[in-house]
Amino acid sequence: MRFYYGDKTPLRVLDEIEFWKQQESEHTVVIRQIVDDLEREFMQQLREWELAFSQAEGNAVRYIEAVIRSKGAISPELCERIKQFAVFARNQSLGFVAFLDRLVAESDAVKNNEIAVVVINHIRRESEYLIGIVTAALKYF
């Protein structure tokens, strides 16, 4: 994401969050499908992450709609709510990265699946990308 959007920065950040929360949700499905013998505990946690990401994506869409309805005149209150949501989205991704690290370290099913380790590391890097984007963009609110 570029950082020369000026007053469009909140909308641009929301677009990124919407896209990456959908990706993170889909990533939980990918992990469950490539590690067919994944431990029940991790399987359940991935389902919970999927739901949480879907909810965050829906919240991003609602904020995007609110910004569009504002016709370029985003109120300070709406801007602050978007900023708080961006912090939430970043922290959610930080939690997911920590979960992925734990999954690779503790799951025997993952440890015994070289492809899964590669895929999970790729997924982690994508979540880290979102974390970086949101962290940088928060300086422009």
Image: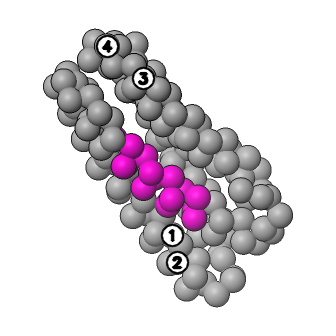
Q: Amino acid at mark 3?
A: Val
Quarter where residue 58 is shown: bottom left
User: Which type of secondary structure does the marked residue at label 4 adopt?
Assistant: loop
Closest to the camera, between mark 4 and mark 2, is 4
Evaluate if marks 2 and 3 touch, with contact meaning CB atoms under 8 Å apart.
no
Q: How many marks?
A: 4
Evaluate if marks 1 and 2 touch, with contact meaning CB atoms under 8 Å apart.
yes
In the image, residue 71 sits, relative to residue 74, either above or below, namely: below
In the image, residue 23 sits, relative to residue 123, either above or below, namely: below
Residue 48 seen in the current view: no
Q: Residues within 10 Å of mark 3 (few under 14, many from 20)?
A: some
Q: Which residue is mark 3?
A: 117
Q: Amino acid at mark 1?
A: Tyr
Q: Which residue is mark 4?
A: 112
In the image, residue 35 sits, relative to residue 141, either above or below, namely: above
User: Which type of secondary structure does the marked residue at label 3 adopt?
Assistant: helix
Q: Amino acid at mark 4?
A: Asn
In the image, residue 8 sits, relative to residue 48, either above or below, namely: below
Q: Which residue is mark 2?
A: 66
Task: Tell me the number on the disc at residue 63.
Answer: 1
